[in-house]
Amino acid sequence: MADIRTTIMLASLSISFPEMRKNAKQEAMKIESDSGAKTGTVTAAKHYMAGVTEHKKIKDYAAMIRAKWNQLTLPWFDGRGAPRAFNALAAMDLQSQVGAWEREYFELVEEFMPKYPVIRAQSQFDMGALFDPKDFPPPNELRRKFGFRTGWYALPDANDIRVMKGVDEKQLQKMADQAVARERVQLERAMGDAARKLYKVVKSMHDTMAIPNGEKGGKFNPSKLENILAMAELIPQLNLTNDPKLAALAKEAKKLATKSPDELRDDDVKRKAAAKEAQTLATKLAGMFAAEDDGEDE
């Protein structure tokens, strides 16, 4: 296996935007008092951008980017927002994609900002006594709350620990050994996650194909094939070690995705054959990750 420092890169992505939402504790307490309810049984919040389409577009787009980012990369360090891994050969494509997201994100921000003063003024009438001007920052201050930040990093090398000065040599060796062990765990988890992503879409197709056409849950949707193809095409980017076995399984998945949707709906023989093929592939993929790790990204 090639040195993983030549095949793996890490990257981080952080998107921020003002929710324009605030808990209304005093209002909740008043409702509790007026109704004789126990303290803590009522929650309330002020939604300053309720019904504002331009603000919702920004929020939805940010959510879409985060979901896509988790699909295009693999977990490496723990924690929300931590750098994630991908195959270094895909760096240019991934950077291009992120750049397109950033441009689109700020285009939506620029659509929203000219309307903000009007929205703030209208809120005085919409919110009545609940309106508080301190909850609406000046436009230039609000604009700074929208952020889109990325970072691109080489994989850390445990050997760098050994050149630290002023630390006991045995302690340095222990730290380096721990770093190597942790790296092995991170790599196994990431590669398992890559296989799991493909497994889930293949298994989803099998679960539908295994039910006779016409019965509940057996209706075939072409998106099942589209999902398999899309994920199979991502595997080179997610195959951190260029594992030939995972590459071969992705190739099998692409072949599976070329099935005719009409035949899978109407031809029982071909439907059963496709179900068997999908099950065989899913079993192979499941063998590449631990069952207890079969979960979702953060």
Image (cartoon, grey):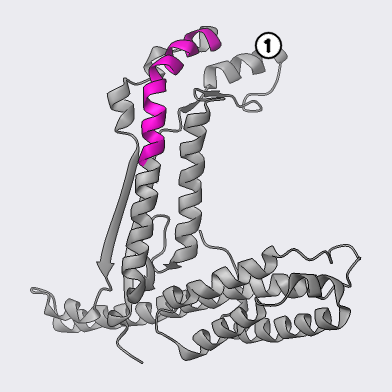
Position in image of residue 266 (x %, y %) = 86, 72
Q: Main secondary structure of the magenta part?
A: helix
Instruction: Give residue 158's quadrant in the image.
Output: bottom left
Position in image of residue 193 (x %, y %) = 52, 73
Residues 177 and 110: in front is 110
96 above or below 46?
below
Residues 261 and 73: in front is 261
- Specify the farthest residue to the left: 165
Residue 293 visible (yes or no) = no
Position in image of residue 94 (x %, y %) = 37, 64
In this figure, what is the number of numbered marks?
1
**Residue visible at 70% across and 87% down in the picture:** 280
**Residue visible at 31% across and 71% down in the picture:** 9
- Specify the farthest residue to the bottom: 1
Element marked by disc 1: helix
Q: Is residue 116 magenta?
A: yes
> What kind of residue is marked 1?
Asp
Instruction: Give residue 35's quadrant in the image.
Output: top right
287 above or below 94?
below
**Residue visible at 29% across and 33% down in the picture:** 144
Q: Is residue 101 magenta?
A: no
Q: Is residue 124 left or right of residue 264?
A: left
Label 1: which residue?
34
* Mark 1 crowd level (few <14, some 14–19, many ≥20, 10 Å Cα): few
Residue 21 visible (yes or no) = yes
**Residue visible at 56% across and 80% down in the picture:** 289
Position in image of residue 200 (x %, y %) = 64, 71
Range shown magenta: 106-127
Q: Is residue 277 left or right of residue 143?
A: right
Which quarter of the rendering shows the N terminus?
bottom left
